[in-house]
Image (tube, rainbow, N blue to C red):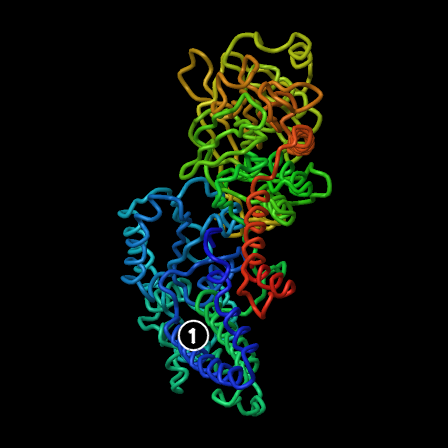
């Protein structure tokens, strides 16, 4: 409420009820009866409204997926039960193209109802799923069939959406078939009785008893061989549930539902209170009870419609949304903003939040290099067999637990202040706000070759960090690309574990590497240097079922089980200077070590940097050349570039920022504005001579003030 409104206006009904009670017994009874009548009417109206909502809910045209467990249940249900394809829209409310494509997406959902499943994921609300799926721009659309991702693209491409929706609808129609065991027994009994003993193998080869593409292929093969096909039925009938209620069985799903044991009849409930005779307290109690019952029914119905099973979330967390930053009505500046969502930024957020600074973490959902494709974390203390996105998500949860808030947008401009007490200004895609202190944790990006196969085999053999991934290729031949100190260090590191290291350099000497490192590489018996040679591409194969079972990327915590089979690197394509043919070099791993680009373009010509663009800090602190601006992680670290060192520097930056805020007496402007409002409110209440009984009541004033503040 506005501070200019009167206390009576802000207090509303509680003030009038209290006055009626004090006016006299008969007046209080009349008011009580009136309140009960109003309460009964409100209860009836609200319950009716909620019931209408429950009836109208049904299967949503576009399912809103709030958690990753719900996301996995959705995919698994339509893989195992319906066979329908699933299209998922990753969006953000602040994204213009997302809002433009939304009505078209809903129209597609109407058009392909009961043929294709349409879902949406708010990247701000469901960070775990968007992080695991490495969503880097909005909108992004993913297409799943039989639980595996078939395609993905970003942008409002309506033509591609139409194409894939039609494709999935066609596949569903073709494969929506099931041959029951009884039908197969009858068929083989007629045409091939000797094969009845192998019936289990036939069903297993067709993909099990649930039906689908395997059953369609089986029908086709049997018809070709025997000139006749076994009797079949639809695998999934969208009206199965409605028919089952009327006693009409027909599909496999209905049969399973009918075979489930009946639930015991519930005992008769005590009669509901008569709404017109109930007291106000009884009405309120009944209202809360009915609201809870209806909301529980709605939640159960939504789970059944969207996911198809009753499994609980794997980790027991029902909702894992993080608090999203909102501007304060007073325009108050924040005490601390953190630009970057990787280990450095999130470590700083944990320390700053525990110090009571309520940091604002500004970063797109990607979350730094740990969110990259195929990233496993095996060298971070206390983290065993986990993916990069899973580690980032746990860091986000920890920061949010202690009070950090998040703004999932890209920072587009920063205006730094030279004066202590004058806040810095931060602009994002859709908003602008101020902060007294800033921690820059924007990281550094690896440089890549941009050759065919490089992105495809990321996580399957191609990497940019030997320290991170080199151990995966122990006793195997590997390739290193580069000619500077980074390439020398990578080659020497890999030589300790790999069977052979081939170092490819486009020049004829290591002019950019230090003499000591270059000599060590040239003299190492496990390292072969290929001068005047470039990499033109990478080749490989798809992993086998046995390899997939052993794939550490899939057994790790937070693994994306929806990914298709991982491509495995087998060869690097090399071309020597003057050669006419490309050489196919057998390798199991390839490490691109051609440098990094620090993400410091926001601060060019504003903060002090070294010759290659890394921020310069005032050692041993994390302070930069501007007051109240600190740097953490790879953006200021051209040497180590590890998640653990980034997290450590993030903690240092938070401690430095807290100390700077305290030394300069930087106020919490949000709290100051709220305290000022409460003071005005209390002064107005206490100065109102008509409050309550004659002369007022200090306790009542306090109660009213608390109610108004709430």
Work out whether 293 lies above or below 561: below
Q: Quadrant of residue 429?
A: top left
| Left or right: 419 as drawn, with respect to 500 | left
The front one of 74 and 212 is 74
Answer above or below: position of 590 versus 75. Answer: above
Residue 620 place in picture, x, y as percent: 71, 21
- Residue at the right extreme, as displayed: 382
Task: Provide residue 339's location: percent of width, then percent of height.
Answer: 54, 33
As rendered, which of 181 and 193 lies closer to the eye? 181
Q: Give the SS element for disc 1.
A: helix
Above or below 650: residue 490: above
Residue drawn at x 54%, y 25% is 592
Q: Nearer the viewer, residue 217 or 362?
A: 362
The image quadrant of residue 111 is bottom left
**Residue 384 image position (x, y, % from top left):** 69, 44
Q: Residue at x 59, y 41 (%)?
A: 388
Front one among 126 and 373 = 126
Quarter of the figure with residue 392: top right
Relative to residue 178, is residue 88 depicted above or below? above
**Residue 465 in view, yes or no:** yes
Q: Which residue is mark 1?
A: 50
For the point 42% across and 40% down, the residue is 137
Instruction: Estimate the x, y position of residue 87 in percent, counting from the top left.
Output: 38, 55
* Left or right of 14 in this view: 515: right
């Amino acid at each position: 409420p506005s501070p200019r409104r009167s206390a009576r206006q802000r207090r509303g009904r509680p003030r009038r009820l209290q006055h009626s009670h004090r006016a006299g017994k008969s007046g209080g009874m009349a008011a009580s009866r009136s309140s009960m009548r109003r309460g009964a009417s409100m209860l009836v109206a609200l319950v009716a409204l909620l019931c209408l909502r429950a009836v109208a809910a049904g299967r949503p045209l576009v399912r809103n997926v709030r958690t990753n467990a719900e996301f996995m249940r959705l995919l698994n249900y339509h893989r195992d039960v319906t066979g329908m394809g699933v299209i998922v829209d990753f969006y953000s409310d602040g994204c213009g193209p997302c809002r433009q494509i939304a009505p078209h997406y809903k129209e597609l959902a109407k058009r392909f109802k009961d043929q294709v499943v349409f879902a949406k994921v708010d990247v701000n609300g469901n960070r775990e799923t968007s992080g695991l799926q490495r969503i880097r721009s909005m909108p992004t659309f993913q297409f799943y069939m039989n639980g595996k991702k078939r395609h993905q693209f970003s942008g409002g491409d309506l033509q591609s959406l139409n194409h894939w929706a039609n494709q999935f609808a066609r596949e569903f129609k073709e494969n929506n078939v099931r041959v029951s065991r009884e039908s197969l027994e009858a068929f083989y009994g007629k045409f091939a009785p000797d094969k009845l003993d192998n019936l289990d193998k036939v069903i297993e080869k067709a993909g099990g008893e649930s039906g689908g593409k395997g059953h369609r292929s089986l029908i086709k093969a049997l018809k070709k061989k025997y000139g006749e096909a076994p009797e079949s039925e639809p695998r999934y009938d969208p009206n199965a549930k409605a028919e089952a209620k009327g006693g009409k069985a027909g599909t496999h799903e209905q049969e399973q539902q009918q075979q489930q044991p009946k639930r015991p009849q519930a005992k008769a409930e005590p009669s509901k209170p008569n709404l017109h005779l109930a007291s106000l307290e009884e009405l309120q109690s009944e209202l809360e009870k009915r609201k809870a019952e209806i909301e529980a029914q709605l939640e159960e119905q939504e789970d059944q419609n969207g996911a198809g099973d009753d499994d609980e979330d794997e980790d027991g967390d029902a909702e894992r949304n993080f608090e999203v930053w909102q501007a304060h009505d007073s325009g108050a500046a924040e005490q601390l903003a953190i630009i970057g969502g990787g280990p450095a930024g999130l470590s700083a957020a944990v320390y700053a939040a525990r110090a009571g600074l309520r940091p604002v973490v500004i970063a797109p959902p990607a979350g730094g290099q740990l969110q990259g494709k195929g990233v496993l974390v095996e060298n971070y203390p206390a983290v065993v067999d986990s993916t990069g996105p899973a580690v980032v998500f746990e860091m986000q949860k920890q920061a949010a637990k202690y009070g950090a808030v998040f703004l999932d947008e890209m920072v587009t401009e920063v205006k730094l202040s030279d004066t202590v007490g004058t806040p810095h200004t931060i602009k994002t895609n859709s908003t602008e706000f101020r902060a007294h202190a800033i921690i820059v944790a924007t990281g550094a990006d690896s440089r890549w070759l941009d050759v065919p196969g490089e992105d495809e085999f990321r996580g399957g053999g191609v990497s940019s960090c030997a320290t991170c991934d080199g151990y995966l290729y122990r006793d195997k031949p590997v390739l290193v690309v580069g000619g500077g100190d980074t390439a020398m260090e990578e080659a020497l590191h890999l030589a300790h574990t790999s069977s052979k290291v081939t170092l490819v350099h486009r020049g004829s000497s290591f002019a950019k590497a230090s003499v000591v490192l270059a000599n060590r590489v040239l003299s190492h018996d496990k390292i072969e240097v290929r001068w005047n040679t470039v990499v033109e591409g990478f080749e490989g194969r798809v992993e086998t079922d046995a390899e997939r079972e052993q794939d550490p990327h899939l057994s790790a915590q937070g693994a994306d089980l929806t990914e298709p089979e991982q491509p495995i690197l087998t060869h690097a394509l090399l071309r020597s200077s003057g050669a006419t043919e490309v050489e196919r070099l057998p390798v199991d791993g390839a490490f691109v070590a051609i440098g990094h680009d620090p993400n410091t373009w926001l601060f060019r010509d504003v903060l002090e940097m070294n010759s290659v663009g890394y921020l310069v800090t005032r050692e041993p602190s994390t302070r930069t050349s501007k007051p109240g601006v600190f740097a953490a992680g790879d953006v200021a670290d051209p040497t180590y570039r590890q998640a653990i060192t980034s997290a450590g520097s993030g903690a240092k930056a938070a401690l430095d920022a807290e100390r700077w805020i305290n030394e300069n007496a930087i106020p919490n402007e949000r709290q100051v504005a709220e305290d000022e409002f409460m003071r005005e409110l209390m002064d107005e209440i206490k100065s109102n001579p008509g409050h309550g009984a004659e002369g007022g009541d200090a306790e009542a004033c306090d109660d009213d003030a608390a109610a108004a503040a709430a």
